[in-house]
Amino acid sequence: MTRHIRNGINAGIIFGIVTIFLFMIGFTTTISDLLGQLLRNGSSIAVMGFTPGIFDLLVFLFFIGMWAGISGAKKTPDKIDTWGTVLLSSGIAGLLHGILVGGLALLVGSLLQAGVTMTVYFAQLLPDAIHLFLIGLNATSAGSFYVIFFLITGLIGGVVARTIRYGSWRQNLTAWSKNKWQAFTAWPQYQRIRHNKLNLFVVYGLLILIVFLLPQVLGQYWNYTVGTVGIYVLLGLGLNIVVGLAGMLDLGYVAFFAIGAYTVALLTAPAPHHLMWNFWVTVPIGILLAAFAGIVLGIPVLRLRGDYLAIVTLGFGQIIAVLLHSDELTAFTGGPRGVAAVGGPSLFGISLGTPEGFVYLILLAVILVIFVTIRLRNSRVGRAWEAIREDETVARAMGINTWSHKLLAFAIGASFAGLGGVIFASRNQFTGPEDYNLMVSFNVLASVIVGGMGSIPGVIGGAFTLKGLPEVLRELENYRVLAFGALLVVMMLIRPEGLLPTSRRKMEIKELHDPDGKEAGETPGGKS
Amino acid sequence: MQQKTALHVHKPVGTYRYVQIILGVFFSAYLLWRLYVVLIAHPAYGPDTWLRFTIDGVVLGSVYALIAIGYTLVYGILFMINFAHGDVMMLGAFGGYFVFEALGAYKVSSSLSFLNAYPVISVILAFLAGMAVSSTAGYFLEKIAYRPLRGAPRLVPLISAVGASIFLENAAQLLFSTQRWDYTNPAVLNRGAGWNIHVGQGTVVVTYTGVLTIVVSVLIMIGLYLLVKRTRLGRAMRAVAENKSTAALMGVDVDGIISRTFIISGVLAGAAGVMWGIHLGLVYYYVGFIPGIKAFTAAVLGGIGSIPGAMLGGLFLGVVESLGPAVLGISFQLKDVIAFSILVLVLVFRPTGILGEVLSEEKV
């Protein structure tokens, strides 16, 4: 009983704080705009007696409230969840949630009525947003409305939780889908097609054909977006080698990206040096310089422990950023103003400097990099990297030269970033210090982690979700980076192997999370 | 934390050792030559300016020291870099800012606000608010982002910490916007006001805020030293840092102690944040990031895991950062590069820090 009450109180307080936070950062307003467009195409007809904006907000809050109820009614270990206890804990959760949010509505509403401008301190508390939040009522009635609203939604959540958890449909569904899948894979035709190499080539060929026809269909904007995602795939694949395969956390990855970009910019642009080289000549130079920088940074740094490595690379990235921003190097790198009119690629007299052309270029680069990664991963070198990632001492004992392998990982990862940088600068026809801030490193890191360390489909999927999805949902642009941070933490908590993990990595993580692995003698640092 | 078993993580062998020595000699020679140039051959600044740089450095260093202790405490116990520590400091700075704003708006008489009428109480309240905000943030940070990851591979909590740092920074950006806000100090603590000292031909201003910063940080450090050395909690903390499983067998509540360590490091970070605001003035969502990395540098510099090391490292880094550009004759824009270069150099050449790392053998 006390456990149920405690669960309810915890969930209520957590969700109350979350809802308040979402309101304070203006997320509730944004999401209700978005919901309005999705549900009603932005029409302004009143729904169920509410003004449309308020209706959208309530739809969103309904789900939050229900979620609070569900998480309040979480399973207790001793399995004594009757209808009564479930409703008790979800009801408490809903009530507390309501009291917190209602209290905020009361506070904000009365401040607004008293004529206090809250935007001075809290940028998102615009009068419009507050009016929306008060759903057209005055402060007191809005406050009491929220208490009742969240109590009811919490109880609904409790009912939902109870129905889902104790119904047998979930097991049935899993068993059914498993049966169907097994029947499908055992089907002789499927087996024949699957094991015939020729068919496989046909499938891949079709896929490649579709991919290569796509840029013709897409408009300029989408080609640009796909190109950006492609560049992030390049970066992600490079970081994937360093973090995912060799297990070294590199937070200064943007430095190599910047080196590639600045190489092509300084060699092809008319401005600071007037070299005006051909784009294709600068591509290998950019890649090699980035790889060289990787080696130069790597030689002293790779002897360090994992977390020291992270902070040193972060420091290196910051050094590069500060140098690019400063006036000291203006004569050489163009300083804070950057380098304009970076040359683009052309082939047999045809300029590839259009968004379509760059999409093809990026596709080629991605395919090349994927090929290199797969060949490396399945080679002696790749196995050595994975051994180093798992346990460096053991790897060394097995006769692996850990130092040179780590250095190789660093150099190859850096060269991929260099390639990405070359294409990036050339596509933008401009490069400036603002493009190479720490956030790039974190974006790439997030796409590698979210997708699954070491997994190529994971990296591609991660880049598409983290870089492509925000392009689709432009309204949520402001919350993108916030979501990255939360996503990194949440991924580590619930699925450290990533969304599309490699099978080997999945098994390793499972093994580590095995309760037998957590013996008393083990240090909390675990394996380094 | 008592038994000093400083280990070289990777013993430099062969050619690497020679490269290290040669580079070290070369670097020291260059530094001496620069010192000779700027002090004797072509003195760029008078003694008053040098004194001013040093004082600035000491003030800044005492703020770094407080943040660095937070890193070192957590690293000593969990062996992870609490990446979000700088952002915890930023939250504390905002806490203090809002107290000053509220007290500045609250009028005790027609023309006098509470802030100016009772400056001492106001400053104390601001520090308490900053510490409260930061320690709460530290507590929940540990509870949400780190505690479930005990026993996971080392990379996992580190990534989680990076994520928490990004989250906190952007949450603050969305809440308070990207604007840079000026701390409104009590009138007696106006930034720039202070005692004038005549040195050579010029005068040096020893600012009140600077003195306040140094005094408060020294008081806090003494308090922390007594806490760690003399109290039951401090003994438990040292036991957990030495060996968690043995400490648990001896009846120490390991999780509770880790929580309290985060609270203590949050208190220090909060104080540092309020000091930052009072002395340097500007507070914004990104304010904790750079000091965070620099304080980590300081912690490594003094030997991570060692509290006196963190204090010394912080002071050293502050002074070097403020004297460095003048000594090396480079632009003041590049003072961050000096700090980061020190970070890289120390980690590469002496990862155990100046005073030697105080970590028990199994942790390394």
Image (cartoon, coloured by chain):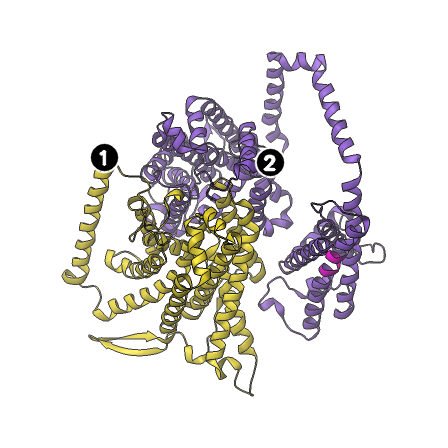
Closest to the observer: A104 or B325? A104
**What residue is at 34 percent from the left and 45 percent from the top?**
A272
Dominant SS in magenta: helix
Note whether B146 is above or below A269 in the view shown.
below
Tell me the magenta residue range: A92-96
Q: Residue shown at 36%/70% (left/top)?
A: B214
Q: Colour of chain B?
A: yellow
Query: Quick check: do tags 1 and 2 share a chain?
Result: no
Q: What chain does badge 2 belong to?
A: A
Q: Amino acid at mark 1?
A: Thr
Name the mark on residue A332. none
Chain represented in purple: A
- Give how far across and how far down residue A99 sits, in percent: 72, 63
> Which circle marks residue B15 in the picture?
1
**Label 1 marks which chain's residue?**
B
Q: Please report the residue visible at 59 percent of the width from the left and 63 percent of the height from the top.
A: A123
Mark 2, residue position: A499
- Work out which residue is located at the far bottom of the displayed protein and give it: B110
The verdict on residue A7 being magenta is: no
Along the horizontal axis of the image, is B210 left or right of A389?
left
Q: Quadrant of residue B59?
A: bottom left
Q: Residue visible at 53% across and 32% down?
A: A508
